[in-house]
Image (tube, helix red, strand yellow):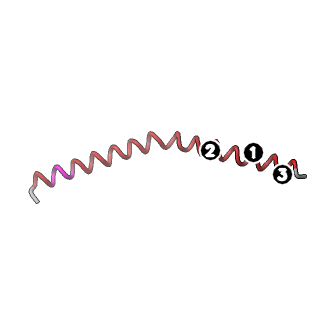
């Protein structure tokens, strides 16, 4: 491989890595919030079911 091709490939892979990490850091807070809401609803439903069955 030529040095120019190696440099271009290294730059391309580095750019993709940066873009992927940016997208993950953008989506992660929203995903965690949605997951937390779903978990809270599930725990709340189970709690009220346990009280109703007493």
Classify residue 23 as left or right of residue 11.
right
* Category of crowding for the residue at label 1, using alpha-carbon neighbours closer than 10 angstroms: few (below 14), some (14–19), many (at least 20): few
Residue 9 colored in magenta in the image: yes
**Label 3 with label 1: CB-CB less than 8 Å:** no
Measured in 3D between alpha carbons, the distance from the residue under mark 3 to the one under mark 1, in whole angstroms, is 10 Å
Extreme residue in the left direction: 2
Can you identify the residue that label 2 sits on? 36
Can you identify the residue that label 3 sits on? 50
- The picture places residue 41, in percent across and down from the top left corner, at 70, 44
Tell me which corner region of the image, top left, top right, bottom left or bottom right, holds residue 24: top left
Measured in 3D between alpha carbons, the distance from the residue under mark 3 to the one under mark 2, in whole angstroms, is 21 Å
| Chief secondary structure of the magenta portion | helix
Which is nearer the N-term, disc 3 or disc 2? 2
Can you identify the residue that label 1 sits on? 44
* Residue segment shown in magenta: 6-10
- The picture places residue 48, in percent across and down from the top left corner, at 81, 46
């Amino acid at each position: 491989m030529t040095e120019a091709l190696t440099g271009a490939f290294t730059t391309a892979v580095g750019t993709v890595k940066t873009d992927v990490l940016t997208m993950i850091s953008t989506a992660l807070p929203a995903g965690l919030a949605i997951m937390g809401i779903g978990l809270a609803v599930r725990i709340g439903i189970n709690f009220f079911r346990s009280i109703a069955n007493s």
